[in-house]
Amino acid sequence: MKTTVTELPESRVRVEAEVPPEEVEREVAKTARALGRSMRIPGFRKGKVPPPVVIRRIGREAVLDETVRDAIARWYADAIGEARIATVGDPELKLPDQLPAEGEAYTFTVEIGVRPKAKLGTYKGIEVGRREPQADDAAVQAELDALRERAARLETVEREAREGDFVVMDYVGSIDGEEFEGGAGRDQMVELGSGRLIPGFEEQLVGAKAGDERTVKVTFPEEYGAAHLAGKDAEFAVTVKEVREKVLPELDDDFAVDQAGFDSLEELREDIAAKLKEADERAIDQAFREAVVDAVAKEATVDIPESLVEARARELWDRMLHSLSHQGITKDAYLRIAGKSEEELLEEAKPEAERALRREAVVAAVVEAEGIEPSDGDILDALQASAVRENVKPEKLRDRLEQSGRLEDLKEDLAARAAIDFLVEHAKPISVEQAQARDKLWTPDKEESPGGAGPQLWTPGS
């Protein structure tokens, strides 16, 4: 495919693509073959009608129109790959008014936003705050408490239920005196105070004991999963069958032996502290990588048009909706939970969208400035884990990516990671106190993150 790229204002480009005649004819034949599988023509078996016969029967223009519908998404991807541009936002696709005659190329035009370019400032030897890993006594104790919780046992008690106890119960729910589907249960156990049931349900069982019968009145939340129950008032006839108390094991050497296989509680504490410190070290490494990129971005000059920020904010929003859909959460349900409109959420996403664009531009500029290009060995190393899962050689996966036109995406991602590695390697870590003092001295009006939240981890493509 032949492409011509023209730069437009506000970080947009126009890509004029030309699909060669021979590829157009191959796609036309493929479409005709697919159409022929469902056609009945005298003299030919069903599904075996040759493409030329199909084209004569329904007309070349109709087949070509169907071909373009099927192939345009792939041709678009090929054109973007051929043009070697990093796109932002949705494309404006302009198709020709007339379809090409046989033997002619098919041309179309795409206008789309592209990643802005950065003019680097200082990017080697930059000073960035980095704290030391730690595992304080409170964190260690929290892990021990969680281990005790998992090892707890339940004992039946002959007393009134308290918060933290477990109640075994039968119940039947009704709305306006009529039982509803899913509103009854037998031998159900719930922890009082866990908040797992409808708001107000658990609280009304505090003080009950085995054999008690209670009427529990609740209102289903407006955002309740079952639409026919949302916002409805309900009553539950509850019979308490048993009250169980959670008994935690003693935190001693026997506990360390039984629950974790250590000879003493002190050894268990030391192991927990070491693992917490390792986890903190990994978190610090990731946070430092991001901080280095942000520090380099602060020294760079990047012009980011508002239209590009809006496009990236939309991409972030769409990506989140796609992720939520896999959890069974619809857009409308999420908007109800958030209590905000789509427009408000898109506006809130703009600062993060701008930061992401700035970081990506800076990393791309470092790749270019340092001539970073992943080797074939780097590519095969990156594919090793996937190759093991699929039980194939990495070389085969590389060839698949190349044939599908996705190898360049992998190379770009590896180059970006290598660029960040380069920046981190050449950065100068300083204490957090030094960094805070410097920022206070140099940038007294520095904005804080929205809501006071700390930095969010970022990697290329996130």
Image (cartoon, rainbow, N blue to C red):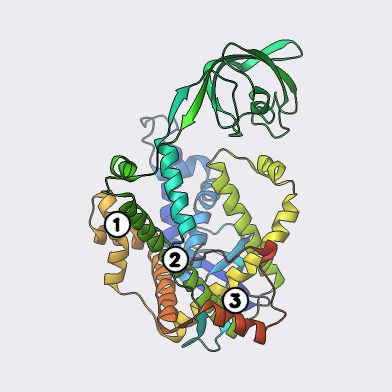
Residue 422 locus on image (x, y percent): 41, 80
Task: Work out whether mark 3 precedes mark 2 in sequence or the reverse, and give the earlier one.
Answer: 3
- Are there few (<14), some (14-19), or many (20+) residues within 10 Å of tag 2? some
Task: Work out whether mark 1 precedes mark 2 in sequence or the reverse, and give the earlier one.
Answer: 2
Figure disc tally: 3
Circle 2: element type: loop
User: Is 1 on the left or on the right of 211, as rendered?
Assistant: left
The reply to whether the C-beta atoms of the residues labelled 1 and 3 are less than 8 Å apart is: no
Residue at the image position 52 percent from the left and 64 percent from the top: 457
Residue 342 locus on image (x, y percent): 72, 51
Q: In the figure, 305 relative to 270: above or below?
A: below
Which label number is shown at residue 116?
A: 3
Residue at the image position 70 percent from the left and 57 percent from the top: 346
Q: Which residue is mark 2?
A: 134
Q: In the figure, 447 relative to 371: above or below?
A: above
Residue 83 at least partly seen: no
Residue 154 locus on image (x, y percent): 45, 27
Amino acid type at mark 2: Gln
The reply to whether the C-beta atoms of the residues labelled 3 and 2 are less than 8 Å apart is: no
| CA–CA distance in space, label 1 to label 3 | 33 Å
Amino acid type at mark 1: Ala
The reply to whether the C-beta atoms of the residues labelled 1 and 2 are less than 8 Å apart is: no
Q: Nearer the viewer, residue 392 or 242?
A: 242
Q: Which residue is mark 1?
A: 385
| CA–CA distance in space, label 3 to label 2 | 39 Å
- Are there few (<14), some (14-19), or many (20+) residues within 10 Å of tag 3? many
Circle 1: element type: helix
